[in-house]
Image (cartoon, rainbow, N blue to C red):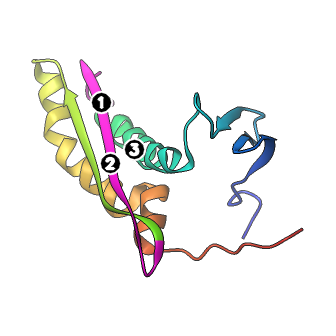
Amino acid sequence: MTDDSLRSVSLTRLSSGQYEATNRAGTTLRIGGEDAFSPVELLLAAIAGCSAIDVDLITGKRAEPNRFDATMTGDKIRDDRGNRLVNLALRFDIEFPDDDDGRAARDVLPRALQQTHDRLCTVSRTVEVGTPVEVTEA
């Protein structure tokens, strides 16, 4: 793999159950605790955000949406395979202007949704394909 392909974040403990993630740009995000996203919520947000960006870039070439919302859900279970999410579902609620550009954007929406699911969204593709995670000590 090349340096261009490597993605990373670092994580620092702030207190019991609370952490701060930092990306290469220096942007930080709190994880855990009452006023922060849980790791599961971040995974759901990552899937929704990745696909939303794809869909927005494709449809946005034709028209700016009047409304662009997405909801990502999943059920957390514990079974013989451990804790995990099942029934993952991403739902988009997008409205475009009622004009030629809006209709053009609406026309490409089904294809954009299919493309993000089938090949574009790195996050959901990684989850669906199933990539092993190596955990080690430094």
Give yes or no for residue 74 being in the magenta stretch. Answer: yes
Mark 1 surroundings: few (<14), some (14-19) or many (≥20) residues within 10 A: few
The answer to which of marks 2 and 3 sits earlier in the sequence is 3
Figure quadrant of residue 34: top right
Q: Which mark is residue 73?
A: 2
Could you say whether the residue bearing mark 2 is in a helix, strand or loop? Answer: strand
Magenta highlight range? 60-82
Figure quadrant of the C terminus? bottom right
Q: Secondary structure at mark 3?
A: helix
Label 2 vs label 1, nearer the camera? 2
Q: Is residue 9 above or below residue 119?
A: above
Secondary structure at numbered mark 1:
strand
- Please tell me which residue is depicted at 29% across the width and 27% down the height of the picture: 68
Q: Disc 1 marks which amino acid?
A: Asp
> Residue at 78% across / 34% down in the picture?
26
Name which residue type carries label 3. Ala
Task: Return the disc, 3 or 1, that comes first in the chain's sequence.
Answer: 3
Residue 48's disc number: 3
The disc placed on residue 69 is 1
**x then y, percent, for residue 137:** 85, 71
Q: Is residue 107 magenta?
A: no
